[in-house]
Structure formats: structure tokens, C-alpha cells
Amino acid sequence: MTEETKAMEPILSVRDLKVSFTTPDGDVNAVKGIDLDVRPGETLAVVGESGSGKSQTMMGIMGLLAANGTVTGSATYRGQEMVGLDPKALNAIRGAKITMIFQEPMTSLDPLYPIGKQIAEVIVHHRGGTQKAARPRVLELLKLVGIPDPERRIDSYPHEMSGGQRQRIMIAMALANEPDILIADEPTTALDVTIQAQILKLLRDLQKRFDMAIVLITHDLGIVRHFAERVVVMRRGEVVEQGATGELFETPKADYTRMLIEAEPSGRKAAPPDNAPIILEGRNVVVDYRIDGGLLKKRASTFRAVDDVTISLHEGQTIGVVGESGSGKSTLGRALLRLIASEGAYRFGRTDISGLDRAGMRPLRRSMQLVFQDPYGSLSPRQTVGEIITEGLYVHEPQLSRAERDKRAIEALKEVGLDPAARNRYPHEFSGGQRQRIAIARAMILKPQAVVLDEPTSALDRSVQGQVIELLRDLQARYGLSYVFISHDLSVVRAMSDYVVVMKDGRIVEEGPTDAIFSAPRAAYTRTLIGAAYNIAP
Amino acid sequence: MLSFVLRRLASAVPTLFIVVTISFFLMRFAPGGPFNLERPLPPATMENLMRAYQLDQPLWRQYLTYMGNAVTGDFGPSYVYKDNSVAELIGKGLPYSMELGFYALLLALVGGVIVGTIAALRQNSLLDFSVMSVATIGVTVPNFVVGPVLTLIFAIMLSWLPAGGWGDGSLRFLILPMIALALPQLAVFARLTRGSMIEALRTDHIRTARAYGLPARSVVVVHAMRGAMLPIVSYLAPCAAALLTGSAVVETIFTIPGVGRYFVLGAINRDYTLVMGTVVLIAIFVIVFNLAVDILYGLLDPRVRHD
């Protein structure tokens, strides 16, 4: 065997792998017999939407399924069968030869132990020795993954670090025993785009240095295009297509792959006419959060979440507010709707609403609605969909009879593309995209004029995201709505809005018409943001 | 840390003050008095007694007198156990109650955590169901049933253990009352442990530990157990306070000379000062144990560390 063919030999071969879960409603087949190979040193992307089985495939191989899950078939690592392997032998591979990092950097580390101890634990377990002896190696790893001041940070607890830093710690742990394969399960989904770019670059550098294979599980085709050599596309537990990245994007064979590629948000929104009147405005908005020192501590400090921001929404306009977590964009949205205490001058249409209290705002509320990011947490699980969407009518149109309310619910559900029968069911019976439609129906039933959309598509798959964007555009055109569209996802903002406001640390760093911002960003920060977003076609 | 403890102790003073004040007036507003016996006393005797114990004074003055004395540690004479002051009664009984309570607490905690952990690791198995059914029975069957049943079996039928009393204070005398006292709390600890262990085993960082090949023992003991202990530690404070200050039922069944019965007897007899003394005792225990638990919590969980 020549050196070259040996290098092409897969180090991990998966054959007819099946994963199923026993549930009270019968067995669920999450993975239905898939084949895939991982070759030394390559980056293999496993792509699919939620429920495609991409994560469960890896969990099955690694013996990490939930208690009701079973895996069958074969997964061989360098000739060693991993499916059905006894725990001791499996533990010798996991964490040493094959390691994993996960989507949730905030919760993947044990909150009760210093990070240095957790990395050392993995080294000691696989290589023997003591925690103390492993310390120099831990320091070296922390340096390697770019943790500043490792001598001090080695004794930090996870909660003392940011999400990006915690993901770096996970990577350090993953590298500790110089693995052959690193499985990265949505490693950057929970991170801001600039941090995402840093983490992906770090992974690529380390991959070269250690000559390890990376299996990248992701739903983000932008990342795949920039990062992976080969792609496996999964749908409903099956592999629909696999091949080299360039080829797959150029000439996708499966319809599903084509649909995924085309699901990237597209289209542009035209600006409203110049003389369109202002519908919602906040001038010199300032929001301070008080950080309490506790009952007996006197010193309370304040944190300025929004710092002197002026924003004017015209009729028919969509203003995209972009920024990373902590930039104050959501807080600004709530301040505009007068939902939180804030300073500044506000008006709605021609009405000055700066000094209005809760009761004073109430008649205006129906015209100013809010849709949240999390379609799971923002709908009460104990109310039917009909009760949820008509609740606002009790406040704003109390004279409506039960039959009239029901009629309005049917109209609202039809308008957002849901079966009217949905009103007798409960939120948990619906998918994420359907839930977001319910949340939109709840806002639309009141016939609002201005709607603040706070990351309405961030929790959704790309293809579903496209549908929700279509729906929002459609409603806007039909009713002349005005939107404040808050998002960290630049591609969605570009497709949705005609004006963009870029926020950082509570201030506006740049604003202007969408095309101008994207084609010729002036502020350095905007350029960084755009540069870090993989999914924006140049 | 020290300033945290001092701050907490300082905040205990108003708490105690409020507890004592409310109890004082509640007791006085309850109908009857310490000298209303089944056969009424002659009016002259009654008057003398009332004067001797200053119960003829206006209520606010009685309150001020009581508070003034209480601050100096004088909780007054018992109205019913006439030769003893409240402080003496409690001082005599407390060591018995505390010793018994300590063993019961230890049994409940260790037993409950072990049972709960086993149930959690074998979730939904026959073992889980049977252990947790027993635990449910432990909570629901009152100790005035458990006590006599234990006595019947182990003292009377089998003659293995004494039926009651303190004897020479050896373990033989303690076993039955300790079990009767511990059983309901053991069941609570078992249920708490099972629930929080199941939750802890589902967390992302447990998945991480498993993904890195750590052996099952260290996943459970090092990573899951420590997190799962937090709710148990929270419950430890009220539980310890309750067990260490004695149980009226268990102490009566097993004729143990502790302080547990004073609270009930005092209340029934309208023995104002004795009830007040017991209330203060329990309040102090609750406050001290809550503080101890908060400190322990900080040691277990770096996220709530007080500095």
C-alpha cells in the first residue's frame, strides 16, 4: 500500500447506522441506516435541518444517546467496532482519539469546577499522572486556543468566562489528548458572528497543526462552503447527497440540497416614499439598568444598555437593527414600545408618548406590537392557540362576542398560513416555524401599524426562515405595516429591511440605506461584522 | 466571607424580634390562661397568682417586661412546671433532643441520598418504583403510627430493643425513636435526591464528561452528585432545625425527656413563657442553620460565592 492510498483510507467508517428512540407514542427512527466515511485530516460537514438526525448520528457512534435511544449498524474507528463496544473500551476512545465540542458553550462545562481542573481531568484520565503534573500541559493548551493570561484564567470557573471563551476551553479539552477526529456539533451557532469567525479560524489552524479530521455538524451552509472539503446532506435520518463541497454547491443533484442552497434569504425591500410620515420615533433614547448590590449592600451600579440613540420609523419602512449580543438592540426595541423605563422623547404618529404611563399607553398598544425570538418560550403552554391569539382582543375590543372573536381568530390564522383548526390545539403540537406564525397572528389580529420583530427568525431552520420572511413581507405589503427588525443575522436583515442601523455597546456606529451599508460600509465595526458573516455572497 | 456572616447575623435580630412579638400576642389572644383549670380556682387565689406573675398588668407592659428580660436571657418562670424557669427546662431537655435529632438527621440524610441516587440511576426500573413507593409510604404514614408499630415488633414481639426511655443513653435506647423520627425526612431526602439527580444526569456538562470517556463512577460522583446536592442542602436547614429541637410525638411515645413535648404541652396549658421560650429556641435554630446552609451552598457552588 502506498503512502497516498493509505492516507485515503477512512479512519472512521459508518455503515448502515440506525438510531431509534422508544417513546410513549411508539418508536421514532431518527437515523435510518446511513453510510459515511471520515478520512484523516479532512473536514467533513454533515448538513441538515433540525430533525435530520445529523447530531443523533454522532451521538449514536459516541455512545451518548439518551437512555431511551438505541443504535445499531456499524461504526469502525481504525478497525475497531464502536457500536456495542463495552463502556471501558469505548471510554478509551472517547476523549482521546475522538473528541467532541458542542453547540452550548454556556452549559457544556461543569459550573462547579475551575476550567483548568476539568481539562486536567481529561488528561489524567487518559494518560495517567496527577492533576498537578497535568497543569503545565493545561497552560500550554489554554495558550494554544488563545485564552489571554492563562496563568490566571486556569483557575477561573466557567461562569466567569464569555461564550466564546468557553468554546475555546472546550476546544482545549478536545485537543488535550491529540485526537484523530474532532466532532464539532454546531460549534458556533450560539455565538456572535465575529466570535464565530474567530472560533472557526482557530479550529482550522489547529486542524493543520495537529493533522486531525473535523466532522462539522451544522445547518449553516455559509460555514460549510468556507470550511469543509466534503459534505454529507442529511434529511429525515437519511443521507440525500454527499460529495466534494465545490461540486455540491455548483451542481447539487438532490432537490433537497438545491432547496437548502436556495433557502438563503434573498430579495430586497424598496424604501418607502420620501414623504412617508413618521409612525414611531425615539429621540435620544437612553436606557440604564440598575445592578443591585443586594438587600444589605448599599452600592448599586448602573449599566447603560442604550446610549443616546435616535431612530425614526416611517410608514411602510423596515429598519433593520443589527448588532451582537449585548449591543442593546433588543433593549432599544422595548424602549421604543415604551415597555421598559427609559429616557428620551418618543412619539407614535403625531402623538407624544414620552410621558405616558401604563394606563395612558394602553389604547395605543394595539397599534404597536412585538414579536419575540423564542417561539417556544413566548407562547403559554397552558392556553390553546385560539386563546393565545385572541387575548389582546379582550383588552382592545372587549365588546366583541365570543363568535366574533372566533371569527377574527380564524381570519388571523388563515392570514399567517395556518389551518384555522389550529385554534383548538396547544402550542406544543406545533413546530418552531408554525409557532412563530402563531406569534405573528397574535400581533396581527390587533391590526397594528408598527411592529417590533425581535430576532423572529433566529430560532428557525433556513428553509422555514425563508417562509416566515415571505409571510412578514406579504403582511407588510398588504397592510402598509412598518417594522423594526432586530437581528444579528446580516443576510436576513439585508433581505428584509430598506434601512439599517448598526449597534455596538448601546450606541449606533453606522446607519443608512441597506444597499449603502452592505456595499460600502464606512465604520470599521460594520466591516468586521460583514466580513465575519459567511452567508453573505460577495 | 466574615462580613457576609456578620451581616446575616445582624439581620437575624429583627427577624427574632418579629417572631417573638407575633408569638407573644398570638398566645395572649388565645382564649383561656395558664391558671384556667378544669375546676376553677377560688377568685382570691386566682387574683394572687395573676399578681404574682404580673398577669394583671396591661398587655403592653407585660410585653415590654418580657422583652426586657428576654434580652438578658431571662425567659421567665414556667407557669405550669412551677419550680422551674423556662431556661432550666429547655437547658435540661435540649441535650436529649439534640442527640436524638442529630442521629435521626444523619440517618435521614445519608439514607435518603443513597436511596434517591440508586433510584435515579435506575430510573423507571422495578427497583426505582419499589424504593420510591416505600419512600412515599414513609412520608404519608405519621410517626405516631410508625413509633408504636416499631415498638410492637422490635421491643415487645422480638424483645431486641427497649420500648422506651433514655436508659443509660446507649445506642440501644436510641435506635427505635431515631428511626421513627428519621423515616419521614429520609423519604423527603430520597425524593429530592432522585429528582435532582435525574435532572443533573441530563445536563449538557454530564454529556461532556461522558463524551470525554470519564468512567461512570466519576461522572456520577464528581460531576452529577455535587450539582444534585444543592436542593438537598437547601432542605437541610429547616429539616435540621425541626429534628434537633425535638418531636413532641416521638418523645412522648418513647418517653424521652427532651424539649419536643414542651411546645405542645405549653400551648395546651397556655404556659405562655414556656411556649415563648420554645419559639425563640426554634427560631434561633432555623436562623443559624439557614446561615450555615448558605455558607455551605457557596462552598458547593462557585456561582453564589459570597465575598
Image (cartoon, coloured by chain):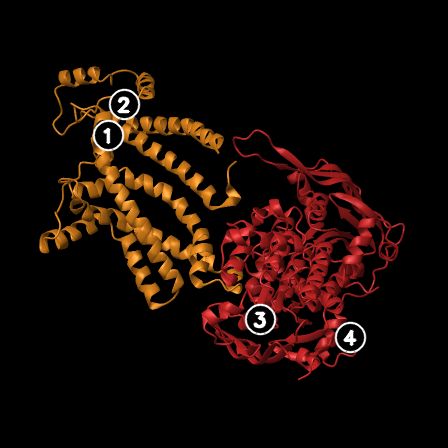
Chain colours: A red, B orange
Amino acid type of the residue tagged 3 in the rendering: Met
Occupied quadrant, residue B264: top left
Asked which secondary structure carries label 3, the reply is helix
As drawn, the label of residue B90 is 1
Q: Which residue is mark 4?
A: A246
Numbered disc in front, either 1 or 2:
1
Chain letter of the residue beneath label 4 in the structure image: A
Q: Is residue A77 above or below residue A524?
A: below
As drawn, the label of residue A52 is none
Residue placed at 75% from the left, 78% from the top?
Answer: A252
Q: Position of residue A106 (x, y in %)?
A: 59, 54
**Mark 2 Cα-neighbour bin, 10 Å: few <14, some 14–19, many ≥20:** many
Q: Which residue is mark 2?
A: B75
Residue placed at 74% from the left, 81% from the top?
Answer: A253
Q: Cα distance, mark 3 to mark 1?
A: 64 Å
Occupied quadrant, residue A318: bottom right
Numbered disc in front, either 4 or 2:
4
Q: Position of residue A95 (x, y in %)?
A: 55, 64
Asked whether the residues under marks 1 and 2 belong to the same chain, the reply is yes
**The C terminus of chain A, quarter of image:** bottom right
Q: Is residue A441 above or below residue B296?
A: below
Q: Cα distance, mark 4 to mark 2?
A: 87 Å
Amino acid type of the residue tagged 4 in the rendering: Gly
**Mark 3 Cα-neighbour bin, 10 Å: few <14, some 14–19, many ≥20:** many
Numbered disc in front, either 2 or 3:
3
Q: Nearer the viewer, residue B257 or B49?
A: B257
Asked whether the residues under marks 3 and 4 belong to the same chain, the reply is yes
Asked which secondary structure carries label 1, the reply is helix
Numbered disc in front, either 3 or 1:
3
